[in-house]
Amino acid sequence: MKNTVATFAKMKAQGEKISMLTCYDYSTAKLEEAAGINAVLVGDSLGNVMLGLPDTLSVTMEDMITFGRAVSRGCHDTMVVIDMPFMSYQVSIEQAVMNAGRLMKEGRGNAVKLEGGATVCPQIKAITSAGIPVMAHLGMTPQSVNAFGGNRVQGKSEEAARQMIEDALAVQAAGAFAVVLECVPAKLAALITAKLDIPTIGIGAGEGCDGQILVYQDMLGLFSDYTPKFVKHFAELGEKMQAAFKAYDEEVKAGTFPDASHSFKIDDDVMERLY
């Protein structure tokens, strides 16, 4: 059965945990859906793990649409949430609604995600009024990395914690169906989760959230540039892939691949007539 915003609301009400992973391509989308993941995020983190960029700021609407369209083709029951990239919603409410609409129409998403609290509530309200579900994102919001002075845990002081609680309540009131809490102290994330009627999805925010999300390359050991503290490697596929690539390289250079079992035949009499 298709996972929707109603599924998220029901799981929150029943105390069931929600699973999310990032996804950027058709083949991985099919695997994540087969595993039972509730929702996938076509994150602007693709700038790091797919495009090799140092941050998410250079990711474009065209990038998000291309990757979103690929993922959506592999998902039938899994909800597809697509990130709104940097400066695609900050300029104006009209810009935000138009770009959210593009991610739904051209990217074939089921919902969009944007970063920020009270300051982006007018955009959230306008986008949801247009019939587009919005997932909010608080805490360490990567598009604000320069303003934060780096990737830092957010909400550690009393003032910052109170502001995050207010922002969470504000995005809920504006119409967000869920909110990501990234790099937030576990006790604060649990308090926010208890105060909200909508689900919280944690990433580096402890076990008290209603659900969890990780970048799939991180949890599979595929991305080695850096490993955040909150990441658990559920497999070391990067090492296995490198070993497979090395074995392929060796067999090609040794002339042992391909052999007869990997080749196609032609009748000898046909070949004789070619000489």
Image (cartoon, helix red, strand yellow):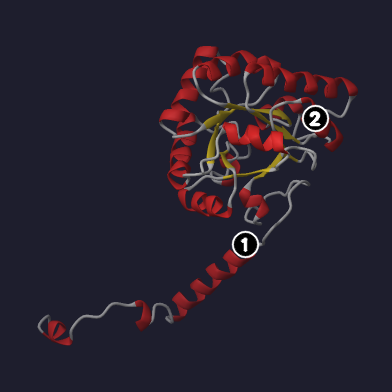
Q: Mark 2 points at which residue?
A: 194
Label 2: few (<14), some or many (≥20) within 10 Å?
A: some
Q: How far apart are marks 2 and 1 (CA)?
A: 36 Å
Q: Is mark 2 on a helix, strand or loop?
A: helix
- The residue under the point 64% across, 32% down is 9
Asked whether the residues under the numbered discs 2 and 1 touch, taking CB atoms below 8 Å apart as contact, a structural biologist would say no
On residue 67, the disc is: none
Dot placed on the residue nearer the N-terminal end, 2 or 1:
2
- The residue under the point 21% across, 80% down is 266
Q: In this view, does 81 lie to the left or right of 140?
A: left
Question: Which quadrant holds the C terminus?
Answer: bottom left
- The residue under the point 61% across, 26% down is 114
Find residue 135 and report its horizontal and vertical position in percent.
Answer: 61, 29
Outermost residue toward the right in this view: 158
**Viewer-proximal residue, 233 or 224?**
233
Q: How many marks?
A: 2
Q: What residue type is labelled 1?
A: Leu
Can residue 80 be seen here? yes
Q: Mark 1 points at which residue?
A: 237
Q: Which amino acid does label 2 sit on?
A: Ala
Find residue 166 and report its horizontal and vertical position in percent.
Answer: 78, 18
Find residue 64 and report its horizontal and vertical position in percent.
Answer: 49, 35
Choose mark 2 or mark 1, whichever is in front.
2
Outermost residue toward the front in this view: 14
**Viewer-proximal residue, 271 or 121?**
121
Find residue 27 and report its horizontal and vertical position in percent.
Answer: 47, 53
Occupied quadrant, residue 46: top right
Can residue 201 be seen here? no
Label 1: few (<14), some or many (≥20) within 10 Å?
A: some
Q: Is mark 1 on a helix, strand or loop?
A: helix
